Structure formats: structure tokens, C-alpha cells
Image: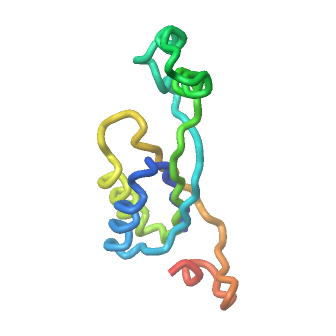
Amino acid sequence: MKEIIAVIRMNMVNQTKNALALEGFPAFTCTKVFGRGKKPVNDQVPEESFLMNSNIPAEVAESISEKHRLLPKRLLSITVPDKDVDRVVNTIIEINQTSNPGDGKIFVLSVGEAVRVRTGETGEQAII
């Protein structure tokens, strides 16, 4: 079994959810998260422009000009049998890939064990 963790744009959750459901993977966990990649967020707007414009509140100018601020994202977690990993990963990529920075990241981790609390089923039976 594998756990697939995907960090995606906020506005892509419903499209991703629908695509995964169509592929036969309707069950997953989604969490609101904040993060950033290695590229500065706002290279194109110099901070001096905010200092010169008195119409912008200081809090807004600071949050916009901060190069290392955290951006809102969504974290999806889905556990699947090994044979389904490529289908899930490819579905997530297909829906979320815009070829622009910030499209997200996908991590695939091994899962040692799973237990369904309601029935006590273990292993793959607990996740299918």
C-alpha cells in the first residue's frame, strides 16, 4: 500500500476530486495548508512601490511585498494499493498541471499497515 500526498492549488480541489472519483478513487482526505516553494513569491513587484503609494494600508503592502510569505494550498492524502499508484498520480498531474510555478508537489510513501476501525479489517481490505 502507498499513501499519496499531493499539495495543490486551492481552486483545483473540486476538479481533482471529480477526476479521482471518475477513476474509482472517491475517498481521500483534504486539508487546508499554507506553504511555499523555493522561488520568491513576488519578484515582479518592488517593495518601494508600496512605500510610495499611501492608498495601500501598511498591512496589505507588507503581506503583498513579503517575498517569503506562505500561500494557501490544499493537501490531499489518499491511500491506495500499489497497483493503483500510477493511475492516481497521473490523474492528479493531468488535472493540476499548468506548467506554471505553484502547480504543486506529489509525494508517494509506503504504508506499513492500515486498519478499518469499524470492522477491524487490516491491510488492503481496510482501504478498498
* Above or below: residue 22 compared with residue 54: below
Residue displayed at 53% across by 44% down: 72
Q: Nearer the viewer, residue 39 or 54?
A: 54
* Above or below: residue 49 compared with residue 113: above
Tell me residue 38's x, y (percent): 52, 27
Image color mode = rainbow
Q: For the view shown, which residue lies furthest in the front direction?
A: 55
Tell me residue 69's x, y (percent): 58, 30
Residue 29 lies in what quarter of the image?
bottom right
Residue displayed at 40% across by 17% down: 44
* Above or below: residue 71 compared with residue 29: above
Q: Nearer the viewer, residue 40 or 79?
A: 40
118 displayed left or right of 4 = right
Residue displayed at 52% across by 13% down: 47
Residue displayed at 32% across by 73% down: 22
23 displayed left or right of 70 = left
Residue 3 appears in the rendering: yes
Locate the N terminus and report the quarter of the image it occupies: bottom right
Q: Nearer the viewer, residue 110 or 75?
A: 75
Residue 67 appears in the rendering: no
Tell me residue 120's x, y (percent): 69, 88
Q: Nearer the viewer, residue 101 or 34?
A: 34
44 displayed left or right of 47 = left
